[in-house]
Every structure is written in C-alpha cells, then in structure tokens.
Image: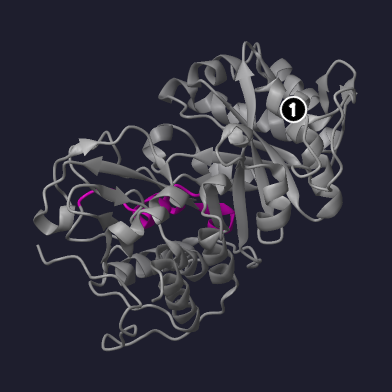
Amino acid sequence: MQTFLQRARLLLLLILAVHASQSNGARAQSTAKIAHLHALKSASIPASKPALIGYFPQWGIYNQPQYLVKNLATGASPLVDQINYAQGFVTNGHCSIADPNADLNYTFTAEQSVDGVPDTATQTFRGSLHQLQKLKRKFPNLLILISLEGHSSDFADDAQPASRAAFVTSCIDTFLKGQFAPGITIPNLFDGIDIDWEYPHQPDAANYVALLKEFRRQMDTVRPGLLLNVAVGPSPRMYEGTDMAEIGRLVDRIGLMTYDMSGPWSETTGFIAPLTASPNYSGGTVAHSVEAYLEAGVPAEKLLMGVPFYGYGWHQVPEDDNGLAQEGSPIHGDRPYSYIASVIPTSTVYRDPDSQTPWLFDGDIFWTYDDPLSISHKARYALDHQLGGLMIWELGEDNAASDLLHAAHESLQAPTQPELSNTDEPSEGDSAPPAPSR
C-alpha cells in the first residue's frame, strides 16, 4: 500500500497540473483585495522568478541525526536560491560569532565534509563556516546570508544614534569582511545580512528604519550588490509606528514569519499556519498577514511568505471534531516535520478544505503542521499574488526525503494552470478525510 507521503507526492503532482479550487470563497475575496492593492501602486516592478529561501540551523551539528552543511550540498542547495545561516549574535553593541565551536572549531570528518576532505585538528579555519566556503565553491550561484539575531533590548540599544554606526561597522567587519577571529579572516563568504529583530517596540520605530539605512549605507561602500534582508512578524502591528513602506524601499527581501498562529500557548488546538480563513478555525491566517503588509506599503515582489518545517502538539485531546478546536495539554516545544511524518502511520490525517491545512490526530494527540500539499497551495498563492517567493524555517526539520522542500521548489516552478471545478476530486486514497462540519 502507498504511504501517506507517497500519496501526498502524487496529489502534489495533481496540484501542479491544476489550480486547486476553494470551497468557501475566502481565497477569491483575498485575491480580489490583493489585486486591488496592486492596482493602487503608481509603478510596478517587472515580475521576476520567485525565490526559495531557507534558514540553515547552526545548531544542526548537535541534532540527532546531525544536520550539516553537507546536507545542503546533497539536498537543498540545488533547490534553493538563498541560504540564511542562523545565526550571528547581537549583544553589547557589536556582532559576534554565536557558537565558536560550531562555526570555527568543529572538526569535520571526510564523511561529514562537503567535498569529502576531512579537517585536521591543527588547521586554522574549521567548523561550519569552513564548510560554507566549500559549499560556495560547489554552488557559486547560491547566495548565503548571515542572519543576525539577539534580544530585542540589545537591538534597541544598538540602534540608538550614539551606538548605531559603530554597531553596524562591527557586523560588517565580522561577517562581510570575514574577521571571524584572530588569525581567521575570510572575506566574501556571506553575500549579505538578514536582520531578525523580534520585535521593535513603538519607541524603536524611527531607530529601526535608521538602523537599516545605516546598514544599507555601509554595505554599499563595502561591496555593491550585498543583500539586506529583514525577518518580520506576522502582523505590522508588531511594528507600530514603523514606516514599512520605507523599509520596503531599503531592503532587498522581507521574510514574513507567517507561522505560529496557534501553538502550546493557545487555549485550544488550532492551526500553525493556515493559508486562508475557515469556519473551523478562528485565529490568524497567512493571507491576512500578507494583505496587511501590502496595505502597509511593502512591495509584493520583496515579500517572502514564511512556511514552517515544524509543528506543535497537544495530548489528552477530546475526540470531538477529530480533536480540532479542543482543549488539551500542550506538548512542550515544537517538533520537526521529520518526527510528525514518522507518526502518521499510527494516526489519521485530516484536512480543512477552507484553510488548506492538515492536522494529525490519533484519538489523544493532535499535531498541527504543514505537509507537501499545504505548502504547494502556499506556493500557488505566492505565484498568484506575485510575491517574492517562500521562506523556510528551517531546512533541518524536513524528513530524509526532503518532501517539504521538494513541494516548495516544484510548486514555485509550476506555471499557472486552470482551476478545478467544484466537482473535481482527487482519486480515492489521495487525500485525507475532510474536517467535520461544525
């Protein structure tokens, strides 16, 4: 018998051949609204190939199994346009290597190395950054950015006028000029900077824009063409008072973190990243987030829709409505898609046709996550609304077959196809049972 993942891949091929229909009109309303927003623009930027961006986890060397830069070479690199290396650290007014062991000191064996050449304990430059250097040689067109992360208060302090320029210089010296450590200078490893400030408060609004201007100014003097990206929360309200239109002019890409709509903090089970609204779910949606940023003045072609390669769970969930919108005991933390996919054989997959969202339930444990089919719908949405592409958090959480990554890549390459009628149905076994009526 076919496994669920095999069935999902078959159904994904169907989605690539036809444009999936919507049952409640929410998608049509969203489409009309965004088309209107596009029409309001005084000038349009020519459409370009949608990008697929993936975050690489610095901590992957500690995972079991490990997720290494070599995994990019054998899996993700041919499929993605840009890798965001997470992470560089922001603290005490400067940028620094977040994990010297992972970045600079880890000694990779021949089996772990991108090119099959082992590190030696005496060589000066080792670690994952050395492996990234090898990756760039193998994939010269692959863009690699350093993702800068830190406490919101540190970013707020560093964005102050008195410290701003020196802070930016520190980040550029460390990561763009490659001054990683005494005796280790590797320029041009990174093609730009991704700033993940979660999140500026209202008093930080002007300084946030000024900080990005300073990054843009200094980066342009170092090397023309360096990329400046930002990661932003699912609602512009997180940036109250911030001129998002100005940010859209300053940066090259804006990664919209359209996930964590529900999770262990929620009172009831729900969806982590539903595409559109549903009568079965009352929380936020990806489409609503996209619309809000477009309304705030962000150019569609710079906006990346975030997709999660992980999910959340609850246990002790009642069986009513197959566990959806029920109270339960949250499972601490998230789980990678690789784990969630592994428990599919002992559970039942349900799918909400309105939000294009799956969930997993075994009568006790409920999981919310994205699967190949839901990601294909999101890629289709990104294409339909001329967004900049998709952003993945994070690559190390996919299963061994990279089903989610392949779904994202293949769907972004798919040409626009005619819609299915409401009577068209996948063949038996190609989809999970729908959600019950509520």
* Quadrant for the C terminus in the image: bottom left
**In the rendering, at what x and y percent does residue 392 appear?**
54, 50
Q: Is residue 197 above or below residue 143?
A: above
Quadrant of residue 189 within the rendered picture: top right
Would residue 293 be seen by someone viewing this image from the given angle?
Answer: no
Could you tell me which secondary element the residue under label 1 belongs to?
loop
Q: Is residue 294 above or below residue 250?
A: below
Whether residue 377 sits left or right of residue 109 in the image: it is left
At horizontal 34% and vertical 65% (from top left) the residue drawn is 30
Q: Nearer the viewer, residue 14 or 21?
A: 14
**In the rendering, at what x and y percent does residue 226 appear?**
77, 42
Task: Inspect the magenta stretch and tell me whether residue 52 lies in it.
Answer: no
Quadrant of residue 277 within the rendered picture: bottom left
**In the rendering, at what x and y percent does residue 200 appear?**
47, 27
At horizontal 49% and vertical 83% (from top left) the residue drawn is 17
The residue that label 1 is drawn on is 106
Q: Counting other residues with Cα less than 10 Å from the Cα at mark 1, is it few (<14), some (14-19), or many (20 or more)?
A: some
Would residue 145 be seen by someone viewing this image from the given angle?
Answer: yes
Q: Nearer the viewer, residue 84 or 57?
A: 57
Q: Which stretch is magenta? A: 282-305
At horizontal 31% and vertical 88% (from top left) the residue drawn is 424
